[in-house]
């Protein structure tokens, strides 16, 4: 192996160590995104302070920008509204989302 080949191997090793792991580049599934969006919408609606509601809204916007369609977003809004209006704990079962 030549010196040039050794330098290239070292550079590739350093680059792979500095880069993010491959599994971090994978986006969550649509179902997971929809569950997280439903949770964010609920948290926005039941937040005790305006600042917390705004923070939950920002999280929702981030989740939507990860590839949800308008129809999927509307579905999440309806699911969140249904949970809130049910009279039961709207967060029940969503703990597995996180």
Image (cartoon, rainbow, N blue to C red):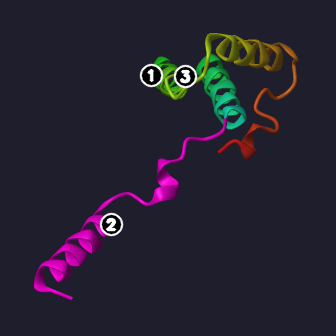
Residue ID for mark 3: 64
- Tell which circle, 2 or 1, labels the residue nearer the N-terminal end: 2
Residue reaching furthest to the front: 1
Residue 6 tag number: none
- Residue 23 % position (x, y): 52, 56
- Residue 73 % position (x, y): 65, 15
Badge 2 density bin: few <14, some 14–19, many ≥20, Cα 10 Å: few
Q: Is residue 63 above or below residue 27?
A: above
Q: Secondary structure at mark 2?
A: helix
- In the shown orientation, is residue 4 left or right of residue 17? left
Residue ID for mark 2: 16
- Residue 54 % position (x, y): 47, 19
- In the shown orientation, is residue 98 left or right of residue 93? left
Residue reaching furthest to the bottom: 1
Residue ID for mark 1: 51
Frontmost residue, 58 versus 2: 2
Q: Is residue 62 above or below residue 4?
A: above
Which corner quadrant of the image does residue 80 belong to?
top right
Residue reaching furthest to the left: 3
Q: What residue is rendered at 62% in x and 16% in y?
A: 69
Frontmost residue, 45 versus 48: 45
- Tell which circle, 3 or 2, labels the residue nearer the N-terminal end: 2
- Comparing marks 2 and 1, which lies closer to the viewer? 2
Q: Is residue 24 magenta?
A: yes
Question: What span is in magenta?
Answer: 1-29
Q: Is residue 63 magenta?
A: no
Quadrant of the image containing the N terminus: bottom left
Q: Is residue 79 above or below residue 26?
A: above
Q: Is residue 3 above or below residue 51?
A: below
Q: Secondary structure at mark 3?
A: helix
């Amino acid at each position: 192996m030549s010196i040039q080949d050794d330098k290239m191997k070292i550079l590739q090793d350093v680059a792979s160590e500095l880069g993010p792991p491959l599994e971090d580049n994978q986006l969550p599934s649509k179902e997971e995104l929809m569950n997280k969006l439903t949770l964010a919408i609920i948290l926005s609606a039941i937040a005790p302070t305006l600042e917390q509601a705004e923070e939950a809204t920002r999280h929702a916007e981030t989740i939507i920008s990860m590839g949800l369609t308008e129809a999927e977003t509307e579905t999440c809004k309806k699911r969140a509204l249904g949970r809130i209006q049910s009279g039961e704990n709207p967060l029940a079962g969503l703990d597995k989302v996180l």
